[in-house]
Amino acid sequence: MKNAIITGGSRGIGEAYALKLGEMGYNVVINYRSDSSKVLAEELVEKLKKTYGVDGLAVQADVRKYEDCEKLVNAAVAKFGDKIDVLVNNAGITNNCAFTALPKEKYMAVLETNLISAFHMCHFVLPYMVKHNEGCIINTSSIGGLMGVANQADYCASKSGLIGMSRALAMEFGKQNIRVNCICPGMIWTDMLRGVNQDEVKALAQAIPMGKIGDVEDIANALEFLIKDKYMTGQCVSPNGGIVMP
Ligand SMILES: NC(=O)c1ccc[n+]([C@@H]2O[C@H](COP(=O)([O-])OP(=O)(O)OC[C@H]3O[C@@H](n4cnc5c(N)ncnc54)[C@H](OP(=O)(O)O)[C@@H]3O)[C@@H](O)[C@H]2O)c1
């Protein structure tokens, strides 16, 4: 049986990733942070069992914290053993705030949640992947990692940072059969997009060549591609309706 861990896996893009991994036959460790997401994560584990016959585990952890990431990985290993086939770093937040009005605590929270958490998770997972001479890490970046966006300096920096980290790890661990890639979603309907100014969302949607906002399944399909294509490493795959053409 194959095993996967997803950070921020109970809702939005993370939930779609979890269902895709279940469909692909993976046991899935679903991380969540908020108490309100506990029930979502536990229901998702039940859905994975019933729909795909795989097992799951819901683990509460704040991935900004090194010790919480250690707890998360230890829980995964205790339940499914130390062969972690896929790690998906997905937890993310955004501020969408004018730079000079952005308090230090808020930009630090974005950098820690979106970027530093991936360092922590890779730190704990990579030794197991090296031991088994196999692994696939997928970091959820963003089109904000490929282009500048006003009021998103913290978010864009965190997402560009993920791309840099992924390329460097792909170089360092390629010969150990460990692949590291990024998915850079465009605008996707989730709570994150529902939480920002809807006039801005509409204006941005009009600028998308395909003229529409994407669905979480579009992003999960990219995950499947990156897991299945064994020659892909150090790359960014960006399902984005054409809004960025790198
Ligand atoms: N939606 C878009 O248009 C879009 C575009 C490009 C990139 N992305 C990226 O895609 C990823 C998922 O976004 P989404 O749209 O699905 O957002 P979402 O619906 O707001 O979900 C965010 C997820 O991150 C988790 N999370 C946040 N802080 C965490 C922490 N400290 N520890 C553990 N988990 C934490 C949340 O867990 P709780 O539920 O427990 O709070 C939740 O599962 C993010 O990295 C985001 O930047 C999204």
Image (cartoon, helix red, strand yellow):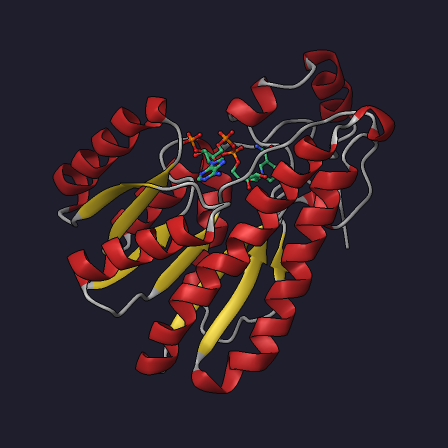
Residue at position x 33%, y 81% in the image: 131
Image coordinates of residue 245 in percent, x first then y, are 76, 50
Residue at position x 23%, y 62% in the image: 77
Please identify the residue farthest to the right as the structure is shown: 100
The reply to whether residue 226 is visible in this rendering is no
Image coordinates of residue 150 in percent, x first then y, are 84, 32
Image coordinates of residue 38 in percent, x first then y, are 29, 28
Identify the image quadrant of residue 1. Answer: bottom left
Image coordinates of residue 87 in percent, x first then y, are 40, 59
Q: Is residue 237 above or below residue 144?
A: below
150 with respect to 65 (left or right):
right
Identify the image quadrant of residue 161. Answer: bottom right
Quarter holding the C terminus?
A: bottom right
Residue at position x 20%, y 34% in the image: 47
Q: Is residue 11 above or below residue 244?
A: above
The reply to whether residue 142 is visible in this rendering is yes
Q: Is residue 244 above or below residue 172?
A: above
57 with respect to 154 (left or right):
left
123 with respect to 243 (left or right):
left
Please identify the residue farthest to the top as the structure is shown: 199
